[in-house]
Image: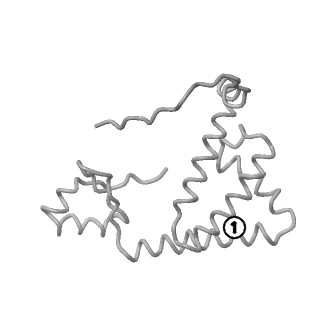
Amino acid sequence: MAPERAAVNFSELVNKNKQTLARLRETPRLLLHRRDGEDLLLTTATRAEQDRTVVSAATRMLAAFARREPGSLELLLDILPEAFPWVRFLPEPDIHAFAVELVDTMRAADSVDNSASVAQLLVAWQHTAEAHSDPELLAALTGHHDDDYGQAHTPRHAS
């Protein structure tokens, strides 16, 4: 079980900055809740670089393993359901495509030091698995549609 993340309101950082920053000695990351925007995660530059180094090393090892070892893709396909239980809903060819795309995207993302594309890939494949897990939804999404539903309207944004 992951340790509970330390959290404070952003105003504490502004009003009691020394005490708030001192908490970083006790915890690697401090979640800052904001009223007017997305929460922030505060950490030290050293910790952030350590995290990046670990992720980069794991990515490079996985990519090298997947390219070099005979049977490594089969092993990766065997362990994917343990790491991502939702892959069980994907058809076999999609599981293979997911594995290859995941390794390639992780490698590319590591080369530009930005993991957003990996997160996006995981969410997209998970949504695909969710569609496959629901026969009615899958039928609605993959069925033949003869009807023309007319022009799509631009959605209105909530104010």
Relative side of 130 to 15, left or right: right
Mark 1 residue crowding within 10 angstroms, few (<14) / some (14–19) / many (20+): some
Relative side of 27 to 91, left or right: left
Residue that lies at the very extreme toward the front in this rendered image: 151
Residue that lies at the very extreme toward the right in this rendered image: 70
| Image quadrant where residue 117 sits | bottom right
Locate residue 52, reporting x and y percent.
50, 71
Relative side of 59 to 112, left or right: right
Q: Which residue is drawn at 24% across and 68% down?
A: 21
Q: Is residue 72 above or below residue 53?
A: above
Locate residue 6, reporting x and y percent.
32, 56
Q: Is residue 157 above or below residue 104?
A: above
| Image quadrant where residue 74 sits | bottom right
**Which type of secondary structure does the marked residue at label 1 adopt?**
helix
Q: Which residue is drawn at 18% across and 66% down?
A: 19
Quadrant location, the C terminus: top left
Q: Is residue 136 above or below residue 46?
A: above
Along the line of sight, which residue is nearer the eye, 141 or 26? 141
- Count of labels shown? 1
Residue that lies at the very extreme toward the left in this rendered image: 15
Locate residue 114, reporting x and y percent.
51, 67
Relative side of 116 to 36, left or right: right
Q: Which residue is drawn at 32% across and 58% down?
A: 40
| Image quadrant where residue 63 sits | bottom right
Q: In this view, does 62 lie above or below 150?
A: below
**Residue at numbered disc 1:** 62
Q: What amino acid is found at the position of numbered circle 1 in the picture?
A: Leu
Q: Colour mode?
A: one colour
Locate residue 59, reporting x and y percent.
63, 68
